[in-house]
Amino acid sequence: MPGQHLPRGEHRVKTIAGELAYFVRGRARQNLKVLVLYCVFLLAVILLNALTFRFLMLHLEGREFTLIASVYWTITVMTTLGFGDITFHTDPGYLFASFVTLSGVVFLLILLPFGMVSLFLAPWIENRLRYRPTKGVAPATRGHVVICGLDPVTRALVSKLKARNIPFVVVTDKYEEALRLEEEDGMRVSYGNPADAEVLLKLQVGGARAVIANLNDTDNTNIILTVRSLCRTPLIALVDEPEHAEFLRLAGADQVIPLKKLLGHYLATRATTQGALAHVLDSIGKLLVAELPVHGTPFSGQSLAAAGIRERTGLAVVGMWERGAFTIPGPETILADRAVIVVVGTREHLEELERLTGEKTEEDLVLILGHGRIGCSAATFLDRRPVPFILVDRAVNPLCSEHVAVIGDATARSVLQGASIGEAKGLIVTTNDDGANIFLTLASRHLNPHIRIVSRANREENVDQLYAAGADFVVSNASVGANILMNILEHKESVFLTEGMQVFRFPVPPSMHGTTLRTSRLRSRTGSTVIALEQPGEKEMTILPSPDDLLVKGMSLIMIGSPEQEAFCRRELH
Ligand code: ADP
Ligand code: ZN
């Protein structure tokens, strides 16, 4: 804040002036008026008492006092000081003196302090102690990420940013939220409307690494327009309605992420036992990364070596999922029926695999519980393959005119059975309520032990519970969203497999030009494995290269490893 940069003395004067200014503003000003009136009243009482004293002394005791002496007497009696240098000697005089003492106690010793405390001191202390949200960041801040809208996705991103020491600030125009985040979570928060240019300027948006717009589509549009009117800072927007993506781009967003649509695809990809091409997760150059359930393939129960996937299709098996645990399989690893293998290869390789495993469109049937945006996107994805599916939702989705859903509460056994849970091969559990998702996973596993269950976790902390409830695969909104955002922020192309494992591209460093994979000792130096070599110009790929393959200039390595290993490669290998 600017105040922090003032010289100390000047700062203090400003502070005191600020505190005094408090008393002439707003309610304090009203109270000040009351105090002035009360003082006038007190003066009147003192004067009245003094005049009465003078009159009584003269007429009862024949002594005459000046007005000053009378006021002096009144004040010493009213304040209960009572020096005793001037006293009455008659009963009416004593009575009057007692009355003056009592009026002093009431008006001066009780009402005045009470009024001072309740009208001034208490409100002032309250004002001092009240939380005043931070507005903006220090003027020298650069390279920070400005996050508009905190939800599980951006919370997961915040953890990643903290881990990488990338500065960030969360902007909110909700006072209560700002208070909660700053006090409870120790989050770096700024209070203000992110669509307001002044607020953005205080956030040093011009020097920011990126702005992430994660409110609803209309508010995001406002933010984007305002940021663009100020600077060229990269703008990333998460969009609810994929059709709105175009508008956000028009407004000036550099990247628009239709997260719900992507999540629907991820869920659908993992729910069918269809041909390999239905399972493509993502691509890196020409290389496609697919997650394929072993169930329904001829490889079920065989070892990786015996399955011969590489020899028969050219695909590399780079990972295996079993109930939430990710491993890198060796030749002896058994491909369990309920496991999901991660394969990488070109489209041709995947087509080869599809020929081998055959298309099983007819026998496939997927049940989708929850027809929100994510469920709807999963349905659209299946429709395109085409895989038959049944949607269940409590209510009609007003945004979708394409699909017809069974209407009913999926937590009711009759509804699940009516939607053929007994016959379905796959199940996608995608309501917006994790409690319901956990319950539905458990109930479905009970009703159909062989069904392939893919569940959505709205909150990261429920992933384990969903696996425990019997899910074969859990897709976490927060993880997926945060990883997409992180990849964009770090300008890198990589495919997220699981927390701590990803496929990334890395150009062969000059020091390795002309060496072979064996002599480069890439694996022992970095810990990550090279799964493919991309020839210059992306014309060709060598999948699972041999140790004798030569590394040349312009070639890229496609590697599998942790984000830390990737960071190590980028930092250490030149
Ligand atoms: P998203 O857009 O993220 O998918 P929504 O809130 O739009 O999230 O969608 C969740 C859907 O799940 C809603 O359509 C809701 O009606 C549905 N849903 C939630 N609980 C149940 C339930 N117990 N049975 C059936 N549908 C449910
Ligand atoms: Zn739909």
Image (spheres, grey):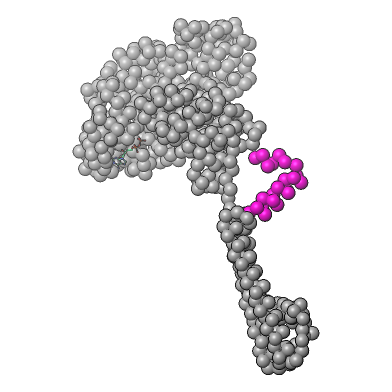
Residue 376 vertical placement versus 307 (above, below)? below
Res 7 visible = yes
Residue toward you, 426 or 419: 419
Residue 441 vertical placement versus 58 (above, below)? above
Q: Is residue 109 left or right of residue 69?
A: left
In percent of the image, x 49 and y 6: which residue is there?
A: 537
Res 312 visible = no
Residue 407 vertical placement versus 523 (above, below)? below
Residue 86: x and y in percent read 77, 85
Residue 391: x and y in percent read 26, 33
Q: Quadrant of the C terminus?
A: top right
Q: Which residues are magenta?
A: 1-22
Question: Residue reaching furthest bottom?
Answer: 90
Figure quadrant of residue 121: bottom right
Residue 381: x and y in percent read 31, 24
In percent of the image, x 57 and y 55: which residue is there?
A: 26
Residue 294 vertical placement versus 50 (above, below)? above
Figure quadrant of residue 38: bottom right
Q: Is residue 481 left or right of residue 271?
A: right
Q: Is residue 478 left or right of residue 565?
A: left
Question: Residue reaching furthest right?
Answer: 85
Figure quadrant of residue 42: bottom right
In percent of the image, x 45 and y 7: which residue is there?
A: 540
Residue 16 falls inside the magenta stretch: yes
How many badges with numbers are in the image? 0
Residue toward you, 1 or 286: 1
Residue 539 falls inside the magenta stretch: no
In percent of the image, x 28 and y 43: which residue is there?
A: 411
Q: Is residue 113 left or right of residue 383?
A: right
Residue toward you, 47 or 254: 47
Q: Which secondary structure type mostly characterizes the magenta part of the structure?
A: helix
